[in-house]
Amino acid sequence: MSRNHIEKLKCPKCGKEGDFTAWESISTDDAPEMKERIRNNDAFMWKCPECGNDSVVFFPVYYYQPDKNFLIHFVPEYSQAAENFMKNLSHDPYDEKTPLKSGCHKRVVFNINQLHEKLLILDEGFDDRVIELMKLFIIAEVMNKDKDSKVNEIYLNKEKDGSIKFALLFDGGDWARTEFIRADYDLIVKKFKVELLSDSEVVINIQWAMNLLNKKM
Ligand SMILES: [Zn+2]
């Protein structure tokens, strides 16, 4: 169920106060307009009514998409409590009487890039766990070619031309792109079939993929 409240914000430019609608919880069945507004960051933008200055306001929000039975909790900074809460969550976060649908995929993300990546993965119909495993293999390949190169971040990304690629941020600040190869994705699905059967973890990132790989080897 969607929920929001009005917060008073002070404009960093002119100092004037104004109302901002902060969403604690978004479900695309009763707030369908938020599906797009969270993807284009509009949900996190506040325009000062006095001077028109745009501010970005990140706040924790639950995002539920019933057609994918997927619940994401976005928390702007790392929180062990949020992780534990999500892991044990079996009902609507703001309504104990409404249980989550069986097989609901639950995730917690701790920055806006991770949130956008999860939404892209959702839209493309991928499994985020497979994507994280792919990243490990991509990084291994990069290091194989040049053992001094260090990848600091890697994201699945939709390019301007609509193609899906991995974006890599190297130590030193350079970005690079590498192809998303469907055959590699399918191979991982096959190889990790058993491990992917249960979906009980809520923080799915490259560290999760590393732990899984270590356990398998
Ligand atoms: Zn202002």
Image (tube, rainbow, N blue to C red):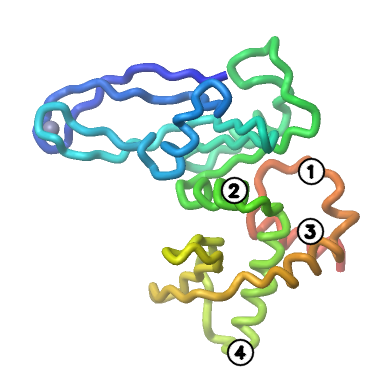
| Amino acid type, callout 1 | Asp
Which percent across, then down, holds residue 173? 39, 73
Residue identifier under label 3: 212
63 relative to 142, above or below: above
Q: Secondary structure at mark 4?
A: helix
Report the side of 16 relative to 102 (left or right).
left
Q: Are marks 4 and 2 in contact (CB under 8 Å)?
A: no
Cα separation, mark 4 vs mark 2, equals 32 Å
**Residue ID at (62%, 70%):** 180
Considering only order in the chain, which callout, 4 or 3, is on the residue closer to the N terminus? 4
Residue identifier under label 2: 123
Residue identifier under label 1: 199
Report the side of 208 relative to 160 (left or right).
right
| Amino acid type, callout 3 | Leu
Q: Secondary structure at mark 2?
A: helix
**Residue ID at (87%, 57%):** 193
Q: Secondary structure at mark 1?
A: loop
Residue 56 seen anywhere in this rendered image of the structure? yes
Considering only order in the chain, which callout, 4 or 1, is on the residue closer to the N terminus? 4
Considering only order in the chain, which callout, 2 or 4, is on the residue closer to the N terminus? 2
How crowded pointer 2 is (Cα within 10 Å; few <14, some 14-19, many 20+) is rated as few
Q: Nearer the viewer, residue 121 or 6?
A: 121
Residue identifier under label 4: 145
Q: Nearer the viewer, mark 2 or mark 3?
A: 2
Cα separation, mark 1 vs mark 4, equals 34 Å
Which percent across, then down, holds residue 52? 14, 35
**The C terminus lies in which quarter of the figure?**
bottom right
How crowded pointer 4 is (Cα within 10 Å; few <14, some 14-19, many 20+) is rated as few
Q: Nearer the viewer, mark 4 or mark 2?
A: 2
Residue 81 seen anywhere in this rendered image of the structure? no
Considering only order in the chain, which callout, 2 or 1, is on the residue closer to the N terminus? 2
**Which residue sits furthest right?**
194
